[in-house]
Amino acid sequence: MDLNTPVTFPCGKTMKNRFMLAPLTNTQSHEDGSLSDIELNWLAKRAEGQFGLVMTCATSVQLVGKCWQGQLGIYDDVHLAGHQRLTQKIREYGSLSVTQLHHGGDRSSEEVTGEKPVGPSDNEEKNVRGLSLAEVEQLREDFIAAAVRAKAAGYDGVEVHGAHGYLLTQFISQEINHRTDKYGGSLENRSRLVFEIVEGIRKACGESFLLGVRLSPERFGMNIHEIKTISQQLIDSGLIDFLDLSLWDVFKPSGVDEQSLMTFFMKELDTKQVKVTVAGKITGSAIVQKVMETGIDFVTIGKSAILHHDFPTQVMNDADFQTTQIPVTADYLREQAVGEPLIEYLRSTRPGFVAD
């Protein structure tokens, strides 16, 4: 498949090629949640490297939802100026700009926020306080307000983060969510908050605003069949433009049968007009092509985008391109516009990534 062909979403927005930058934690924002020049450069360099859609890191919709130092925020108008600079820069390279809306829930850091983490239910072992019904409703409104703020900042759209064990995942999880009100119990109730957020964003931001949802089918009490059901319901709702499936490894067996996770979803879902992307160990041209052959609309690139700011260009120009092997030197990463905070984050969280 020609990877340099455009993708037009149901909302009417067009992505120039088949490559999206994954929402990568980079810890490069200022401590008040505003964008730094380092983070601006990091993301702009990926737009320059021809990612058709450049997504920010997980961006906090509430202060209490922050998970790490240097996390980008969109919960206050003070953050707007930085986001406006970023969207203008990304647009200069002809790429779409999307910010990912996030709340850490019980994975939030009290050291960072100064508040006890919150979740769907009390959990004394994790020192987590369950949200009241009024607080859940406020959370929904804060997700929607963050999307409105993103639109005002010039973003083409937003992605709602419902993956990786963060707050929306915690609501979906039978293991974590023990509520007895309309947000707990049945799958309909446990996924209610996701749907209310999506509905609210579409209503507040309009039909031409790009709207995606990220889901992951494993870990944190996720059930692959429940995630398939939620995915289909999101598609059937007509409210979303793309579904972002974060699989950690696109070729990992589904556990249902001999199919991979990626193939399971592509065979089980009636995607209609909604575009589907996957992330998980996509490390070169051959893998990109193999992924696209399953019917995926575009690929989402994480680790390979850290190692190569121009991964799309490399893949489109060389059918044999393969991502550089780790470890790599700090100087190599600096050449890829990786800032010092992200280099240190990689050192501490991904052993063997940065050479000593």
Image (tube, rainbow, N blue to C red):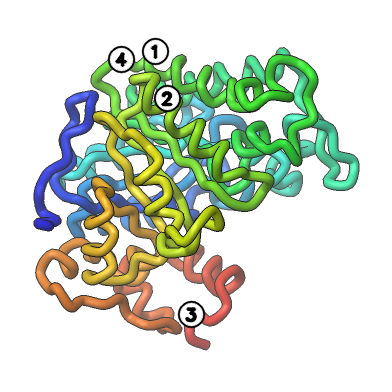
Quick one: label 4 or label 3, which is nearer the N terminus? 4
**Residue 83 seen in the current view:** no
Residue drawn 32% across and 31% down?
Answer: 157
The secondary structure type at the circle numbered 3 is: loop
Mark 4 in CB contact with mark 3 (< 8 angstroms): no
Q: Nearer the viewer, residue 262 or 13?
A: 262
87 lies above or below 309: above
Residue at 39% x, 60% y is 302
Q: In screen coordinates, is 302 left or right of 188?
A: left
Whether residues under marks 4 and 2 lie with C-beta atoms below 8 angstroms apart, the answer is no
Tags 2 and 1 touching, CB below 8 Å: yes
Q: Which residue was labeled with disc 4? A: 206
Q: Secondary structure at mark 4?
A: loop
In the displayed structure, would residue 339 be above or below residue 149?
below
Q: Which residue is mark 2?
A: 147
Residue positioned 48% across, 80% down in the render? 354
Gap in angstroms between the C-alphas marked 3 and 1: 43 Å
Q: Which mark is residue 354?
A: 3
**Amino acid carrying mark 4 in the image:** Gly
Amino acid at the residue labelled 2: Ala
Query: How far is the residue under mark 4 from the one under mark 3?
Result: 43 Å
Kind of residue indicated by mark 3: Val
Q: CA distance from mark 2 to mark 1?
A: 8 Å
Assess whether mark 2 and mark 3 are in contact (beta carbons under 8 angstroms): no
